[in-house]
Structures are given as C-alpha cells and as structure tokens.
Image (cartoon, rainbow, N blue to C red):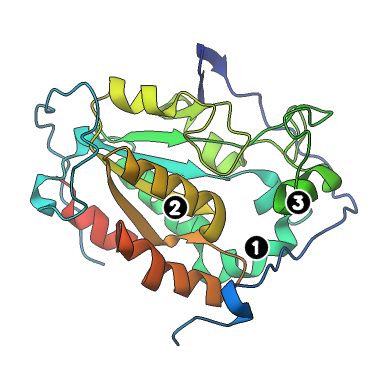
Amino acid sequence: MEAHDKNGYEGAHPHFEAQGATTRSRVALDFPLPGGRDPAASAPQSNSAIAHPPTTRKWADPSHSATRDWQDMNAKETALILIGFQNDYFAPDGALHAAVGEEMEATQILPHTLDVLNRLKDTPVTLIHTPILFSADYSELPNPAGLMGQIRDLGAFRRGTRGGETIPEIRQFGNRIVTVDGKTGFNAFGGTSLAQVLEERQIKNVVILGVVTSICVDSTGRAASEYGYNVTFLSDCHAGRSRAEHEFYSKSIFPLYADVKESDEFLAELR
C-alpha cells in the first residue's frame, strides 16, 4: 500500500504478520448521546467511470453548496477516504473491537467496503486510507481525555504493533490505495497531508467510509465540508458503537452538511 505523510511518500506498508490471539482489555466506549436519550428512529449495476477532464482549481471553494447535480460527479474528481480500517477495531482480539464489533457485523461494513473498492480499483477514483497511529509512549497525547485517554490506557493504535496495522483485506489492494499518515486525532485532515493530496489530484467530491460514525467519520466529514468539498457518507460502509448511534447520525446529523447514500446507489451515479 502506497504510504504518504506530510513530508511525502514513504514506501510500502509493512507486511502483515499474523499473531496468535491475546487476551486484551476492552472498552465499551458507550458515551451517552446528548441528554442521555436514544435518538434513533426506528443491485443496480454501476456505470463505467468515464475519465472526464478535471476542472482546474487551486483549492476547494469554501462557499460551495452541499446541494449539487450528481450527474457532475465524475470519477477523476472523486476520492474515497477510509477511516480506521485497523486491527484494533476489526480483529476479534483488537483493543477496541468490543466497542464496535457488533455494529460492524450488523452493517456488514467490511464486505460492503471491499465490494466498493473492488468495483473502483480500475477506475480513476482516488482511494485513500488515513490510519490513526501513536508512538509507543503516546507523546502525541500529553493530557488525553475521553476516548483518547482510553486509547492510551488500552495501548491501542501504537505504531509498529499488530493492533495499529491496516487490516489485510485493505492492504491487499497495495499501492492502489494511498496511505496518508500522521493522523493522531479524530479529524483525518488534522496533522496530515490529506488536504494536499486532494488538492494535487483536483478532487471535488469526498466519500467517507469507516469507523467510528460519531467520532472520526463525522469529524472528517465536517472538516471536508468546511473546506468546500462535496461530502457523501456511505451508510452501509460505516459503523458506530450502536444501532441507535448509526441511525441517528445517518438520518439526523450527516444530512445537515452532506449526502447519505448506500454504496450501490453511489456506484450507480458515479460517471
């Protein structure tokens, strides 16, 4: 997998080495939604991606509206951003698997994501993964609170560990997926070269997949919207800590600044 950080490309992602399951502490991360309430309300064929010439632009227009004609969404101007596809979330013995594992199974996030990637790998769509990684001493988190404190306490997402590695199902795509390194917070733009990569490729449309719905997925989507990108969430390709959280964000939060589609609908509309 092609690796990219804010200083440039650093080479291939390290090869996955399977290790035996170990007993690890797990955390529910079940922070209540505002007010302690449960806010939840209760295959078309894809078109071939036609490589239209991209619109030349130096930077996304911050005043650009989220409402647009989807006929204008072409492959060359579209980037998929993958968030959190790492062993500490997806492996059964992952430090944070207990927090999201049930919901990942319910949404079938991994099979749906792999289907999207397989159908786009031979198109001009830009594919990006933004793993969160910390040094062994978590020096990036001097005074962590909430989830970040729990990540440090559990030893999750440490660079050079199996838990921090990108899952093998994603790494099988090799250099077709650009890895943007440097993420140590919720927002994939913060401290990384993601904005630079999107600018260099003249991207207009950002499509977000991954975990956790209410945290890194939402934070990255809001940042992309504020930078002026057209943002889309694939509802069957992200997962939260509960069905209530997933439904609440997909139906009540994301539509405030983005589009929410299932993956087949998005693929059918891509040109």
Disc number at residue 113?
A: 2
Residue type at tag 1: Val
Give the answer, above or below, for where 5 lies relative to 221: above
Q: Quadrant of residue 245?
A: bottom right
C-beta proximity under 8 Å, tags 1 and 2: no
Residue 22, image x, y percentages: 89, 49
Q: Which residue is mark 1?
A: 100
x 56%, y 64%: residue: 240
**Contact, mark 3 vs mark 1 (Cβ under 8 Å):** no
Q: Residues within 10 Å of mark 1 (few under 14, many from 20)?
A: many
Q: Nearer the viewer, mark 3 or mark 1?
A: 1
Q: Residue furthest right?
A: 23
Query: Within the image, what quadrant is residue 105 found in?
Result: bottom right
Question: What is the distance, in whole Å, between disc 1 and disc 2 at their CAs?
Answer: 16 Å
Task: Give the mark, 3 or 1, whose residue is nearer the N terminus.
Answer: 3
Q: Is residue 261 visible?
A: no
Q: Quadrant of the C terminus?
A: top left
**Residue nearer the viewer, 91 or 180:** 180
Q: In the rendering, at what x and y percent does residue 269 appear?
A: 17, 54
Q: How far is disc 2 from disc 3 in space, using C-alphas?
A: 19 Å
Task: Say few, some or many: other residues with alpha carbon within 10 Å of mark 2 (under 14 / 14 to 19 / 20 or more).
Answer: many
**Dot 3 corresponds to which residue?**
94
- Separation of marks 3 and 1 at Cα, in angstroms: 10 Å
**Mark 3 residue element:** loop
Neighbourhood count class around disc 3 (C-alpha, 10 Å): few under 14, some 14–19, many 20 upward? many
Tell me which label, 1 or 2, sits earlier in the chain. 1
